[in-house]
Amino acid sequence: MSAAGSVKIFVPCDAAALGVGADETALAITAEANRRGITVELIRNGSRGLLWLEPLVEVDVAGTRMAYGPVQSSEVAGLFDAGFTTGKPHALSHGATQELPYFKRQERLTFARVGLTDPRSLADYLAHDGYRGLQAALAMKPADIVACVTASGLRGRGGAAFPTGIKWKTVLGAESQQKYIVCNADEGDSGTFSDRMLMEGDPFVLVEGMSIAGLATGATQGYIYLRWEYPQAKVALESAIAAAVAADYLGANIRGSGKSFQLEVRMGAGAYICGEETSLLESLEGKRGQVRFKPPLPALQGLFGKPTVINNVISFASVPIILDRGAEFYQHFGMGRSRGTLPMQLAGNVKHGGLVEIAFGMTLRELLYDYGGGSYSGRPIRAVQVGGPLGAYLPESQFDTPLDYEAFAAIKAMLGHGGIVAFDDRVDMAAQARYAMEFCAIESCGKCTPCRIGSTRGVEVIDRLIAGENAPKQEAILRDLCETLTYGSLCALGGLTPFPVISALNHFPEDFVKPVRAARAAG
């Protein structure tokens, strides 16, 4: 019960929860409570990440959050009948949220507040250690902030895994009257949703992280380049920015320090290629989203030709805890050169889809079965794609690979943004390879020939290969074409498209053989 004697109930405002009826459930709870004369304080929190239980309703019982889910509006009256406002059991009850195995074993640093707080409340954010990182940064010299981030071992969480501190140091050392901080929030990879969850569930941590980056590099203006399909995130971010400005955590005189940082949200137009940093900059400048030649690097000549830090949402959101708890604390998590935690996103044919934040080092198999619960269909998991639509397809024999940047690179794969899409033994891997090539053809910005033409020809070659038209020759052509894409493309879209294609060819060659395909279709 809250201090006023009301029952505190949490219903997520996360887009995934809204998609399965969270708004209707929230309305039903309010209406039913009013009908029964029960005073309820309804809080719209972020999602806990247990997406198979959404809408997940939580009730605060003497300081412990009790979980019920998935709760549809039609089931609300039954929950009240069972006494769920005092934590009584029901067919939909799961006990204390913190004790759920899926949640309890996670190591939540970046997502520590997501699902716990009201994402629109600055007071709630401050009460849960918010802005402690910024307060620490205000007392430090810019070079010392950069040194702290560098020592933490934080690498870009957007896919490239470039050391964040090195990028910041380059911008700090660049001579310019104007510098920029740009957040790549154009989350477009299939099977990824951690950026969205964080922006909707804890927008202040992104605002704080970008503010720290501004202090560290001398940048006074920031932009969040947001995927246009994320309207709820836009509302959450703009609300957080307004609250931060009102409380002097953003603006011309941050907390009386005399230091300035301004922040705006800019919406993308739905082009996948704008997830590439230079295409993003072109789009921000009001131009067509096309890849720029490098050098010059954005850190030296980025937005409007000025030194620019570009990181993704999770990278910036990881910074506040580093400044608050220290580089050594953050580096304690992980393995090798992969330090800290990574929010992994489980999707596809998996029983328990959702978000799992864990330290680097856990194996893919542990993630798929200990957290994901195996396939949703109950059949064997045959393949997983890690790292979005340009990630390699991994067979069961590679499921014991630890989640580590270098370990994945050693098997010609990548962790990317941490998205994992699972497939059971009914998947057609030749069709998946074709999809990768077709995706590249559709999303190419058209600036370089290998990507623009190579991807289109690649689709045609795969079609001939699976049709059995001189298969050995077609496979040789396809492999040669993939090598051209890898080494001749201007950016990672064309350069990484061969990952899923070649991995499918190498690990699942039988799916490209016409008689085998015909037998499977018949059986």
Image (cartoon, rainbow, N blue to C red):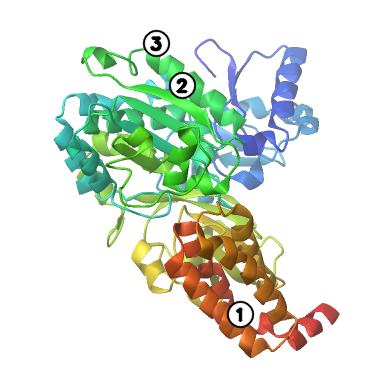
Neighbour class for label 3 at 10 Å: few (<14), some, many (≥20)?
A: few
Q: Counting residues from the N terminus, which is met first, the one under dot 2 or under dot 1?
A: 2
Is label 3 in a helix, a strand or a loop? helix
**In percent of the image, x 60 and y 29: which residue is there?**
232
Q: Position of residue 441 (x, y in %)?
A: 62, 59
Q: Is residue 111 visible?
A: no
Q: Amino acid at mark 1?
A: Phe
Q: Amino acid at mark 3?
A: Ala
Is label 2 in a helix, a strand or a loop? helix
**In percent of the image, x 50 and y 32: which residue is there?**
286
Q: Position of residue 238 (x, y in %)?
A: 50, 21
Neighbour class for label 2 at 10 Å: few (<14), some, many (≥20)?
A: many
Circle 3 residue: 246
Q: Which sits in the foreground, 471 or 224?
A: 471
Q: Is residue 112 visible?
A: yes
Q: Is residue 326 above or below residue 441?
A: above
Circle 2 residue: 240
Q: Counting residues from the N terminus, which is met first, the one under dot 1 or under dot 3?
A: 3
Find the distance from the CA under tag 3 to the CA under tag 2: 10 Å
* Quarter of the picture holding the N terminus: top right
**In percent of the image, x 28 and y 31: which residue is there?**
179
Find the distance from the CA under tag 2 to the CA under tag 1: 48 Å
Residue 258 quadrant: top left
Residue 243: numbered disc: none
Q: Which sits in the foreground, 138 or 479?
A: 479
Residue 24 quadrant: top right
Q: Is residue 184 above or below residue 43?
A: below
Residue situated furthest right in the rendering: 522
Circle 1 residue: 508
Q: Which sits in the foreground, 178 or 240?
A: 178
Q: Counting residues from the N terminus, which is met first, the one under dot 3 or under dot 2?
A: 2
Taking 310 as reference, is 271 left or right? right
